[in-house]
Amino acid sequence: MAPRLWIMTTFSSANINPLHRQRVKGREIVITEEPRLHLVWIHHRIFVKPLPRYLLSHEFWEIYLDRNSDANRLGNSQSDIRRAATGFLRTYLYLIQHESDFNIAQEMSLIPKEVDWPSFCLFVSELDDIEDFAVSTRYCYGELRLTRLNFYAPFLLRKFYFEHIYAQYGEFFSRLYGPILFAFAIVSTILNSMQVALAAEQLVAVHWDSFLHVSLWFSIVSLVGAAIISLWFVLLWLWLFTDEWVFTVRRKMEKKRETRTTSSC
């Protein structure tokens, strides 16, 4: 799915809110040990994988991930693992940008307790020069929305969903209540307006002309209003969908031009 992530999110590795900003947005930081869920968010939750101690070890990088190491203990997969580890490590450059972010990370056990703020600043200062070509394709992007991953999973992964998070049937169907109630309200308004219009015709026999005209006009206004509201929601959705796609395609083209410019230099 990684090569198609540009469809679902901003094509930028810096599209990551620092930890203090996650809390400003009202998101709960949920620890996960699954790398594929790192920086995936849904509603008011975002999943973050803790930073392992071994990735902070210079000796570990020299022994296992250094491309110039004499003893290649990871075989042909060393390059892919190094790019994945480098990309994952770079995400913490954006997650922890202030001391308040650092305090949140230690509070949530996202980084080892023995690491202090000055040492961490010195460490991440070397991550700012890492380019996208040096990391896995996944880490050329930042945060990912789980609802979009689940939507595209049947087409790209041949699976029903990317990650199933609903433990109960009630949680699954609760997200459908809003659209169903909206559709029910629109249909009820239209049917009631039509019923008023039909009932108003019976007032001719009792010569309630004024009330007849009011009833007819009210039913017509209700029908037109329901149609306008429904059309407005459809057009709003189309505008948001189109705007996101235009931005996504534009960002994709900009990235391609930047890559060509870098290659030519």
Image (spheres, rainbow, N blue to C red):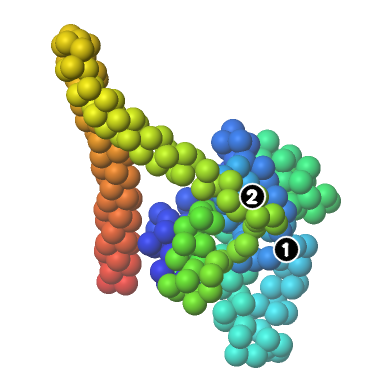
How far apart, in angstroms, are the residues tagged by discs 2 and 1? 24 Å
Quadrant in which residue 215 is drawn: top left
Residue 155: % across, % down: 43, 72
Q: Nearer the viewer, residue 65 or 163?
A: 163
Quadrant in which residue 7 is drawn: bottom left
Q: Nearer the viewer, residue 191 or 130?
A: 191
Tag 1: amino acid: Glu
Q: Secondary structure at mark 1?
A: loop
Residue 141: % across, % down: 47, 60
Q: Nearer the viewer, residue 133 or 246?
A: 246
Residue receiving disc 2: 171
155 on left or right of 128: left
Q: Earlier in the sequence, mark 2 or mark 1?
A: 1
The answer to whether residue 94 of the structure is visible from this angle is no
Tag 2: amino acid: Glu
Q: Nearer the viewer, residue 224 or 110?
A: 224
177 on left or right of 34: left
Of badges 2 and 1, the one in the foreground is 2
- Identity of the residue drawn at 40% across and 54% down: 10
Marks 2 and 1: CB-CB under 8 Å? no
- Quick one: quadrant of the C terminus? bottom left
Residue 23: numbered disc: none
Q: Is residue 233 above or below residue 92?
A: above
Residue receiving disc 1: 33
> Crowding at label 1, few (<14), some or many (≥20) Cα neighbours within 10 Å?
few
